[in-house]
Image: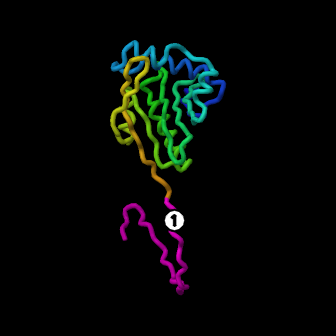
Amino acid sequence: MPVPQPAIMPLTPAMLPQLAGLYHAAVQQSMHSSYSAMHKHIWSPRVRDRRHWRARLRGYQVFVCCERDAVLGFIACQTRFPQRGELDYLYVAPEAQGRGIARALVQHLLAWAREQHWSELSTQASHHSRPLFAALGFEYQGRCYQRRAGLVFESFNFSLTLPTQKALPTQKTLPAQKAQPTQKATVPHHGESN
């Protein structure tokens, strides 16, 4: 029997409790060593309820990576800006890290952003996710600092310019030309040459 592969899909309300638990576990168990226990406690003091996450993710496009019925990771991008997005959340369950899930989520979001004709995607990456964004071609823009409950949280600004589809040039009508006979191309058989 084939092993089910993780799938990426839009978040549904039924997934919010798993997302909340995953977020808290990822912050508490797997954040970079640059963050102290107090940083982790301030960042996520407890698992928040469904109502909290529904309000927190309003105005975001959220994708989850699921395997069977388990949420393994999620990515969330603000959609309130015209032509660009700001990626705010990228978390993978501690037990699922190292499987390429974060990379797959970012690549999925990039494909979706291109479909929306966005020109740019930006993020404030943590110490933990900084190498991933650099590896995916995001350009480092500098450090930034947030102060919460008297502690400073360092992060790294990254942005990525997305290719835009350029409009095709209008085709000029050429004067009618006499059709030339076409030559049939021949493909040499193995061992033969033209």
166 lies left or right of 14: left
On whether residue 108 falls in the magenta region, the answer is no
Q: Quadrant of the N terminus?
A: top right
The percent coordinates of residue 139 (x first, y second) are 36, 42
Q: Which of 101 and 19 is in front in this view?
A: 19
Q: Which residue does the image show at 66% across and 24% down from the upper left?
A: 14
Residue 67 shown left or right of residue 13 in the figure = left
Residue at the far bottom in the pictured view: 178
Q: In this view, does 187 lie above or below 107?
A: below
Asked if 78 appears above or below 190 in the picture, the reply is above
Name the amino acid type tagged 1.
Leu
Q: In this view, does 139 lie above or below 187?
A: above
The image position of residue 97, as x and y in percent, is 44, 23
Instruction: Choose between 153 and 177: the one closer to the eye.
Output: 153
Please report the residue visible at 52 percent of the width from the left and 62 percent of the height from the top: 167
Image height of 185 relative to 41, above or below? below
Residue nearer the viewer, 77 or 182 = 77
Residue that badge 1 annotates:
168
Which quadrant of the view contains residue 60?
top right
* Residue furthest right in the image: 14
Whole-percent x and y of residue 110?
Answer: 49, 42
Q: Which portion, as a residue range, is magenta?
A: 166-194
The percent position of residue 115, horizontal first and vertical second, equals 55, 48
The secondary structure that dominates the magenta segment is loop
Q: Is mark 1 on a helix, strand or loop?
A: loop
- Pick out the residue farthest to the front: 150
Q: Which residue is painted at 53% across and 81% down in the image? A: 174
State which quarter of the image contains the C terminus: bottom left
Q: Residue placed at 50% from the left, 45% from the top? A: 84
Q: Is residue 131 left or right of residue 59?
A: left
